[in-house]
Image (spheres, rainbow, N blue to C red):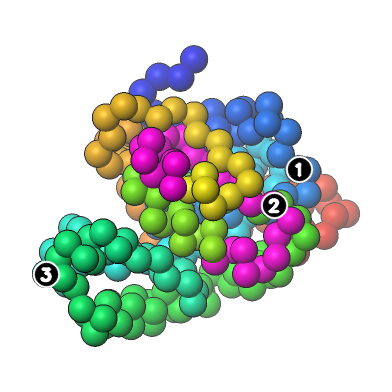
């Protein structure tokens, strides 16, 4: 029985894994956690479904004079802009480019630390299971799905414990399947649906990736999970 708020991301991940078992996710799927907020949820799912785990670094593009407000997101060379916010606030092309450049260098450093090339290559012809702690506007997840599509997965499935109805509609239009445990009527921010919620730095991400590799080796010592 679903009880909100979730205690933490690990609990939410366990419940999400149970739902994904019923959805019959492909056994050769590759799971990806969104950075910075989705890795703990993704680790629990990958561990319970015995899937390899990678990370997708999605960076928010903040409105220049209001850092709490997002005007889009980037992942790798993919950018998704919230045209409504940009138009309403008359944000210029130069301001958008400056925000992109500010985030690109930081994202490239994080991606290099976590060494995600093998995970992206492995997803070709397989199911990409993209996981986050939740969906608010949906801009981050849409960015992640368009990024992973460049690596030619056979299917893209997005799975989250909680999401806004508008954000989930936006994401559903981009993917083959969306799994969301609950879509509350009133939704402000992902963190409000967790008693304990925090985003992760690169060290935490690397620990989860290492733990996933070790877990897979214990379960299937003769298999190649690269």
Q: Secondary structure at mark 2?
A: strand
**Residue picked out by circle 2:** 155
- Check if mark 3's residue and mark 2's residue have beta carbons within 8 Å: no
How many neighbours does mark 1 have within 10 angstroms: few (below 14), some (14-19), or many (20 or more)?
some
Mark 2 vs mark 1: which is more N-terminal? Answer: 1
In space, the residues marked 3 and 1 are separated at their CA atoms by: 44 Å
Q: Quadrant of residue 125?
A: bottom right
User: Residue at point 33% right, 41% down?
Assistant: 190
User: Residue at point 85% right, 55% down?
Assistant: 223
**Residue picked out by circle 3:** 65
Looking at the image, can residue 107 be seen? yes
In space, the residues marked 2 and 1 are separated at their CA atoms by: 10 Å
- Check if mark 2's residue and mark 1's residue have beta carbons within 8 Å: yes
User: Residue at point 52% right, 48% down?
Assistant: 173
For the C terminus, which image quadrant?
A: bottom right
Residue farthest to the right?
Answer: 222
């Amino acid at each position: 029985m679903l009880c909100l708020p979730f205690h933490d991301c690990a609990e939410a991940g366990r419940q999400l894994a149970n739902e994904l078992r019923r959805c019959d996710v492909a056994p050769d799927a590759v799971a990806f956690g969104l950075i910075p907020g989705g890795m703990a949820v993704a680790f629990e799912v990958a561990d319970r479904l015995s899937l390899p785990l990678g990370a997708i670094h999605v960076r928010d593009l903040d409105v220049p004079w209001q850092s709490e407000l997002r005007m889009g997101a980037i992942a790798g060379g993919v950018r998704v802009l919230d045209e409504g916010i940009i138009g309403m606030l008359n944000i210029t092309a130069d301001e958008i480019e400056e925000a992109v450049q500010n985030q690109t260098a930081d994202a490239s450093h994080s991606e290099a630390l976590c060494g995600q090339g093998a995970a992206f290559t492995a997803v070709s012809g397989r199911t990409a299971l993209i996981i986050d702690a939740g969906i608010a506007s949906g801009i981050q997840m849409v960015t992640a799905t368009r990024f992973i599509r460049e690596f030619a997965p056979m299917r893209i499935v997005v799975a989250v414990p909680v999401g806004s109805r508008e954000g989930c509609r936006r994401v559903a239009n981009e993917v083959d399947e969306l799994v969301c445990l609950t879509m509350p009527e009133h939704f402000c921010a992902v963190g409000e649906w967790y008693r304990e919620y925090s985003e992760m730095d690169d060290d935490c991400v690397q620990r989860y990736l290492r733990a996933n590799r070790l877990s897979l080796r214990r379960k299937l010592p003769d298999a190649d999970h690269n």
